[in-house]
Amino acid sequence: MTTRYRVEYALKSHRRDQFIEWIKGLLAVPFVLYSQPTGVFEGQGINNVKMAEEAHRRYAEIMRDVELMIDDHMAHQVEHNPVPSKLKMLVPPIGELFTRLPLEAAFKFQDRKRYISSRRYVAPSFNDVRLILNSAQIMAVTTYGTLQLATFDGDVTLYDDGQALESDSPVIPRLLDLLQKNVKVGIVTAAGYTEAKMYYARLQGLLDAMAASTTLTPTQKQSLIIMGGEANYLFEFDPCSPYLLAPVERERWLTDEMMSWQQDDITALLDVAESALLECVKTLNLPATLLRKDRAVGIIPKEGVKIPRESLEETVLVVQKILEVSISAAATFRDSPKLNRVPFCAFNGGRDVFVDIGDKSWGVAVCQKWFGGGDGKMIKGDNTLHVGDQFLSAGANDFKARSVGTTAWIASPSETVELLDELADLMGKKLAQTS
Ligand code: IMP
Ligand code: MG
């Protein structure tokens, strides 16, 4: 039994997004019933056109039905209804949603781009559904309200893993365009450095372009911040500072809850994480070096080698489990460190594994507070969009941002560019309607 449970867990739950899988399953039925695999022998005949139209109609109906279920789920949230919504019963991990999702319109938009309904051999996929959800989310943040804050993960979202934002990156003009439209921008990255110089090395293209811009106003230039180490180091764009970034002391930006994180508890938690990581290095014979920082501890591959993906995942799951057990054990002894006061994030960075103090829900919340206008006011979740590549429930660090704002899940910097173009288009249309 235990083994079966562990196999199920290890193979499935942390590597699947259950909401996306569920929608994929719903769309598989019309795919099986209406796709005509023999149609490929008939050229562009009437039957093929009819097939695509029929599949499109059925897929759109399903997306409309899911959209209505989301409306019902949100009504439960608003009423604090103790009875779970139908959606919650069908997809138990579904969490709080900040906006309704126009899934039918988003499906039609993506079907025009990706010809999902015209496919006979490949059913609507995980990526199709992920992109439909992204489109629905950005339609929602621009249509039902106003986007005030956009936060972006770094690696894989703005630049390739381990690389930097070079001056010719197509992401840069799109980020400047957001700032020009008075949207606040936060780069919320796990990369944790205490010095501006290190962030400048990763973000030079963007920072230089901001400094050189003659169209951005001083207020718009002040609307870019870097939140590093998940939620540990804050830098403001500042054209007069060395490396164009001014560090901001913690006292100025910590949220009230974050103020209660004590240094002793942080050190104790990182000590447990460090010994768990070292244990994994030994057990799995990982070609890795330990890296301890003041707010994080990680293992990075030795020069010229790659740690297998399975080993990285195993390490994350083991370390997470050990930390969880230590936290609940520590809570029962009065004089042990209060590990439970300090949230952490253990994640697989693609090449490395890190345990950071805090997580991106705190990082995005700091941005919401920083740009909230003072007096502890925060930009609300439905006016916030976090764009990232890591949204699996375990071992992924953008996932936590879902609890404080709307999110879009991209798989590469070029998808971020497409998403920002879609967003600019929708914001432009909205502007045209209101003017
Ligand atoms: P993100 O995708 O921008 O959140 O960056 C994640 C990557 O940053 C990790 O995979 C690491 O390679 C790198 N990194 C550098 N320093 C740190 C740290 O202190 N904590 C976590 N990740 C770090
Ligand atoms: Mg990333």
Image (spheres, rainbow, N blue to C red):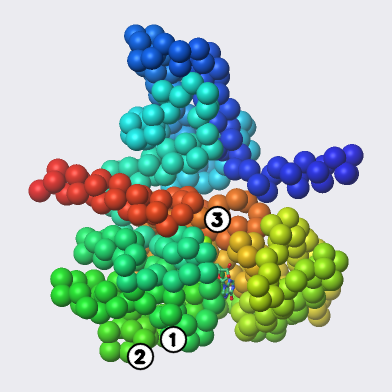
Q: Residues within 10 Å of mark 1 (few under 14, many from 20)?
A: some
On the picture, is 435 further left or further right than 265? left
Q: Nearer the viewer, residue 405 or 45?
A: 45
Residue for point 57% across, 61% down: 397
* Other-residue count near label 3 (Cα within 10 Å), few / some / many at <14 / 14–19 / ≥20: many
User: Which circle's residue, 3 or 1, is located before the other in the chain?
Assistant: 1
Residue 67 seen in this snapshot: yes
Q: Position of residue 356 (x, y in %)?
A: 62, 72
Q: Report if the beta carbon of the residue with label 3 is closer than 8 angstroms to ligand 2.
A: yes
Q: Residue at x 75, y 71 (%)?
A: 287
- In the picture, the quarter occupied by the N terminus is top right
| Foreground pick, 276 / 219 | 276
Q: Are marks 3 and 2 in contact (CB under 8 Å)?
A: no
- Residue for badge 2: 242
Where disc 3 sits, the SS reads: loop
Tell me the amino acid under the disc marked 3: Gln
The CA span between labels 1 and 2 is: 8 Å
Neighbour tally class for label 2: few under 14, some 14-19, many 20 plus, Cα within 10 Å: few
Residue at 37% across, 71% down? 166
Q: Which residue is mark 3?
A: 390
Q: Quadrant of residue 358?
A: bottom right
Residue on which the image places disc 1:
197
Question: Could you tell which of marks 3 and 2 lies nearer the N-terminus?
Answer: 2
**Residue at left 46%, top 66%?**
154
Q: How many marks?
A: 3
For mark 1, give the secondary structure: helix
Q: Position of residue 51 (x, y in %)?
A: 41, 14
